[in-house]
Image (cartoon, grey):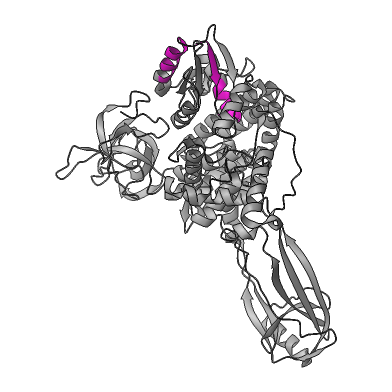
Amino acid sequence: MTKKLVIVESPAKSNTIGKYLGDEYIVKSSVGHIRDLSVVGPYGLGVDVENNFKPTYEVLKEKKKVVHELNQALKKVDEVYLATDHDREGEAISWHLRETLNIKNQKVYRVVFNEITRSAISDAFTQPGDINIDLVNSQETRRILDRIMGFRLSKLLQSKIKSKSAGRVQSAALKIIVDKEKEIEDFVIEEYYEIYSEFQGLKAKLFKVNDKDPNLTTEADATKLIESLDKKFTISKIDVKNTKINPKQPFITSTLQQMASSKHGYSPTKTMRSAQKLYEGIDIGNETVGLITYMRTDSTRLSDIFIEESKKYIHDNYGSKYYGNTRKSTKKQNVQDAHEAIRPTSIYRTPEKMKKHLSATEYKIYYLIYYRALASLMKPKLNEVTTMVLNNKNTTFRVSSTKTLFDGYLKVYKLLDKENGNNVIDLSKYNVNDNLEADEVYSKQLFTVPPARYTEAKLIKEMEDLGIGRPSTYAQTILTLKKRKYVVLKEKKFFPTEQGVLTIKKLDKYFHQLVKSNYSKKMEVRLDEIAKGKEERVEVLTDFYQYFMPLVANANKNMSKVPPKETGELCPKCGSKMVIRTGKYGEFEACSNYPKCKYIKQNENKQKPDVFDTGVQCPECEDGTLVLRTARKGKNKGNKFLGSSNYPKCKYISPLKVEEERCPKCSNLLVTNEAGETYCIDPKCGYKK
């Protein structure tokens, strides 16, 4: 029997897929990327700029064992199926696998699928294709461009202003936050007044004065206008019309992150981590199956199969009057480019049925995805809106009533929709030309408010609207801004730090066009063109490099260094001023007369950070990662434990016991839980002892 090797990205996915395929298949995981740009050559770029930007790749240190295991598996097979994710990054990973592994006489195929279900996997393996080199070129161009810009800018800023990093996407996102803060600081609060008239419980608001918007900026203005009015108001118009509110499109990556943030307060990282699990496979008792389609997408398309399945489900559970798909039917697409919105893989696996198999977070994310997709195929909400207009001299007052005639998609979406209430006022007893005497006409003092700071949801929406980065980059970009301490979250809103403001100030001065959002957007368009085979990678990189390098040279020459901050103390050794410097382990106080005087003030209360970072997100603060620490005091002195890298801000301690030996698959930590199960701490690895 011909043996076939299937290589996917994650162990969880390999476990699920392995259960669908027959004994002739060996399913292995690359655990993400196996190689990356090296740090050789000028400035450690790993790119030969003079030779058409030729990259030099090297196998990641932590993946050498994975590569060895894959090469061992290759000896047993005649065919190789590269089944990494069906986006540009996944295409690039497949290409790197093909270029790196000892593939000799084996036939190599590329398979992609939008969902991890038995039928989707079966279809994909009956229609294998080839690696799309245009997608690879696009991803490689992005990686090289961001490596050059990131390395050169980061080194410049580190030497000049002690900022840790900069980059095309992260700096553009930081500029949005900094610019918003300046807008808030420059905002001038202004007083204004609204005027209302009440008629036996009916309240109408001033709408127009001399057919223009009211402009009442003082109490005297409001009082003068009120005193000019007659006691009686005349109804000049009663308008009744029906309005439709269409259901929202099914989720794409950015809108899922926005909804999860605004409704549940989840960070983009937390949302995508849960969505990844839902995609890769959940044990639902009788089988392991992916509950949602691929979660990194900017397409709102739904497959015809899912639409037909949902149509029957809606008819059977809510009645035929609720089905209202207005989407244009699309031809069945080849499985190799089956990009869809994020949706449930089966409309019959309801959140309520799946709840017992999911964690609390996974359930909430699945709930959002399921009902958003279902609602998108239902009829619009139908409202009856009645507007009554009252005249009094040169003024117009208005009152409106909204009544739901048909709930439509809100039948299933009402728990997710903030605007599902009615504003029902009985206006049926009023007629045009009726005169009404006001019980009271009064003014209300108000003040203009500054623009709101960005929440994570609003920042993602802004990045999407401005075309900064791609859906798959939003979570990592926001996490980087937090880690670099360029921004902080207070009451779920972003505030730029002093270092963040300084970073943008310098970048704005010397690299103004590069940190503007439209530059990132234009570059994304060119990367898209490479992916379509309409642009050449060398031309795109050359245009960028020829524009970028003179800016770097100018900044190196003219950007002034920010002097270290003085502490107000004098060095006890030489009498020079003490300053705050930044080193490998963070900030410390030292003599300003370095290197002549090498005095460093000791801080006995400050813990030296541990050398090993697991890379696994801290479940408590979500901003930090779990690092290996050693207890220095008490009865546990000398024992190893896992704590947050954000200590002392976050004092989370993991209950997991750290083993002495390391994971044989990825060299990360092996841990044992309270049930005695030993496994790799990195869920992407999936190793269990």
Q: Which residues are magenta?
A: 66-94
Residue 299 percent across, percent down from the top left:
66, 40
- Left or right of 176 in this view: 36: left
Asked whether 169 or 472 is in front, the reply is: 472
Any part of residue 497 in sight: no
For this orientation, the residue located farthest to the top is 105
Q: Residue 436 at x, y = what percent?
A: 77, 90
Q: Position of residue 420 (x, y in %)?
A: 62, 65
Task: Please state if 605 lies on the left or on the right of 290 as rendered.
Answer: left
Residue sitting at the far front: 316
Front residue (pair 579, 272): 272
Residue 652 falls inside the magenta stretch:
no
Where is 244 relative to 647, above or below? Answer: below
Q: Residue 610 occupies which quadrant of the picture?
A: top left
Residue 36 in percent (x, y) is at 50, 23
**Residue at 47% over, 34% down:** 159
* Residue 683 figure quarter: top left
Residue found at x 53% / y 45%: 349
Q: Is residue 629 above or below residue 543?
A: below
Task: Classify the position of the C terminus by image quarter.
Answer: top left
- Looking at the image, residue 665 sits to the left or right of residue 251; the answer is left
Identify the residue shown where x is 54% and y is 9%. 106
Up/down of 98 relative to 403, above or below:
above
Left or right, 170 with reference to 233: left
Residue 79 in the magenta stretch? The answer is: yes
The furthest residue to the left: 635
Which of the pair 199/603 is nearer the observer?
A: 199
| Quadrant in which residue 519 is drawn | top right
Count of marks, rendered view: 0
Q: Would residue 643 be seen by someone viewing this image from the given angle?
A: yes
